[in-house]
Amino acid sequence: MQENSNDFTEETCDDMNTFSQGNEDFSTENKENFRWSHEAIMLLLEEYRSRESSMSSGKISQKKVWNEIAAIMNSKGYDVSSRQCMTRINTMKRTYKTIKDHNLRSGNNKRTWKYYDAMESFLGKKRYMSPLTLISSTGKSSFERSKSPSPCSSSSSTCQSDSKVSRKRKAADVMEKITENRRMTEEGKDRRHKERMEMQKKFMEKLDKILDKL
């Protein structure tokens, strides 16, 4: 069946998130009404990525990780709970896997998503995120991870090395973008704070003048 659109938008992700959060209770009205901006998502991905390996290995409990991430998000002005952070990441994992599975099936138009590369940087290497066998539109098996031959021979160390370098470079590019987005967000907050302080200063000056005339 042909898809009407090949692009996964933020609205798509928000709809999935709303469905999964439907019956959950949050501590404040602000948290309940929080809408994930691009900057908030990029910060969340950066903080999760830096802790993902420790959490997966059991070095640190999941509850502690999500509490730490939520605390950082709150300190940056994003009023979200640890549960909301966890739900958002889980939703994005499902979106990533859906797109990855779709794109691996023959006969499908390639889907895109602006967070795909960021998710790929730390989920692409996980075997559980990809199906072992995919069925093509003809009903025949078209992909089998454990049996399908690699474009490079298993004895080719050069090819394997090139592949690792390529993945590392791609991950580095993604993280550079995340860091740049975070820097721009911080600069924007500083600028808005200065503007508010300047407006408050002018207001107080006008108020003083009015009081002097009384």
Image: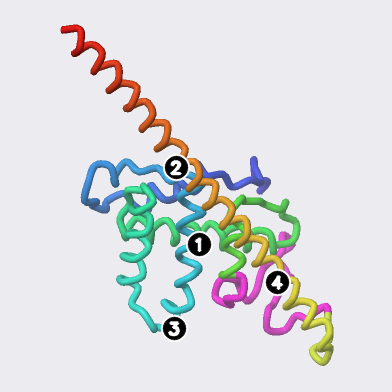
Mark in front: 4 vs 1 = 1
What's the colour scheme?
rainbow
* Residue 31 placement, left or right of 175: left
Instruction: Please name the residue that numbered disc 3 is placed on.
Output: 57
Instruction: Kindly identify the amino acid type of the residue bearing the numbered disc 2.
Output: Asp
What amino acid type should be assigned to the residue bearing mark 3?
Ser
Q: Nearer the viewer, residue 175 or 190?
A: 190
Residue bounds of the magenta highlight: 124-151
Residue at the spot x=24%, y=17% of the render? 207
**Which mark is first along the chain, 2 or 4?**
4
N-term-proximal mark, 4 vs 3: 3
Q: Give the label, 2 or 3, closer to the camera.
A: 2
**For mark 4, does the 10 Å Cα neighbourhood hold few (<14), some (14 to 19), or many (20 or more) residues?**
some
Element carrying mark 2: helix
Alpha-carbon span between mark 2 and mark 3: 37 Å
Label the magenta part by its dominant secondary structure.
Answer: loop
- CA gap between label 1 and label 2 equals 21 Å
Which residue position holds label 2? 190
Residue tagged 1: 46
> Outermost residue toward the front?
212
Q: Quadrant of residue 61?
A: bottom left
Q: Quadrant of residue 108?
A: bottom right
Amino acid type at mark 1: Glu
Q: Nearer the viewer, mark 1 or mark 3?
A: 1
Specify the amino acid type for callout 4: Arg
